[in-house]
Image (spheres, rainbow, N blue to C red):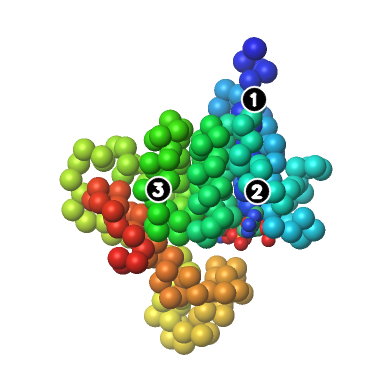
Amino acid sequence: MGEADKRLKVAVLGCGSVGAQVVRLLMEQSDDLAARVGARVELVGVAVRRLDAQRDVEVPDGLLTTDAAGLAAREDVDLVIEVIGGIEPARSLILSALENGASVVTANKALLAEDGPTLFEAAAKAERDLYYEAAVAGAIPILRPLRESLAGDKVTRVLGIVNGTTNFILDKMDSSGAGFSEALEEAQDLGYAEADPTADVEGFDAAAKAAILASLAFHSRVTASDV
Ligand SMILES: NC(=O)c1ccc[n+]([C@@H]2O[C@H](COP(=O)([O-])OP(=O)(O)OC[C@H]3O[C@@H](n4cnc5c(N)ncnc54)[C@H](OP(=O)(O)O)[C@@H]3O)[C@@H](O)[C@H]2O)c1
């Protein structure tokens, strides 16, 4: 098979806020990706809960499916991208993908913070890759440097603002004297906060990120419930 014929078959699990943009980029940047990856990235399926939901991307005909388990387990798939979120069925789907020979990329901080080691062990056993760079501080190179470049260094402290929504709210309250509900409402209007802001304002999102960062920085097992 010539270079030009090489294919990397990709399945995406979830097509919500994050998944829709992943699907869009995979399609729009197909030529760029082919040049960079050295193989044409072929989207082979997108798993969702509801086939008829309104989406921010037009998924090509025949690719949407509600059979996430079947898609994750397909033996011809090289890479499974999990952007469903939550613990189950995300965990079972990732484990099944690895067992069936695919590498996995996930943005699922809740799952990594709760049960990361199970996923890492499964990836090691299957000799497949498991990447999760976007689960914490997506655009900032932090997880991979901690895991690779700084692996031999002794990290003494990790400091950072990890939750954009609460950072916006606190900043607003501080700079304009706005009350909490008012600042939250503005964050929601601007699309920074979700309709259900519990994960952000109750600190669960920050706790999951702290657990993932601490586990990597201090070579220990820290779960979200420890934070
Ligand atoms: N949103 C962010 O800014 C952000 C940033 C970093 C990381 N993340 C992480 O990215 C992940 C996804 O977040 P999101 O905001 O994109 O979530 P979301 O908008 O709620 O999307 C979830 C998607 O998963 C699908 N889904 C749910 N249950 C399913 C099931 N059992 N089988 C198949 N598909 C199922 C939903 O299908 P339907 O569309 O049919 O309902 C939807 O397309 C989470 O782990 C989150 O923590 C999000």
- Residue 158 is situated, as x and y percent measured from the top left of the image, at 26, 56
* Residue, disc 1: 7
Q: Which mark is residue 175?
A: none
* 224 relative position to 24: left or right: left
> Dot 3, how many residues are within 10 Å of its Cα: few (below 14), some (14-19), or many (20+)?
few
Residue placed at 74% from the left, 59% from the top? Answer: 50
How far, Cα to Cα, is label 2 from label 1?
A: 22 Å
Residue placed at 46% from the left, 52% from the top? Answer: 135
Secondary structure type for disc 3: helix
Q: Which mark is residue 118?
A: 3
Q: Which circle's residue, 3 or 2, is located before the other in the chain? A: 2
Secondary structure type for disc 1: strand
Q: Quadrant of the N terminus?
A: top right
Closer to the camera in the image, 183 or 46 = 46
Where, by quadrant of the figure, is residue 174 drawn? bottom left
In this rendering, is residue 110 above or below 11?
below
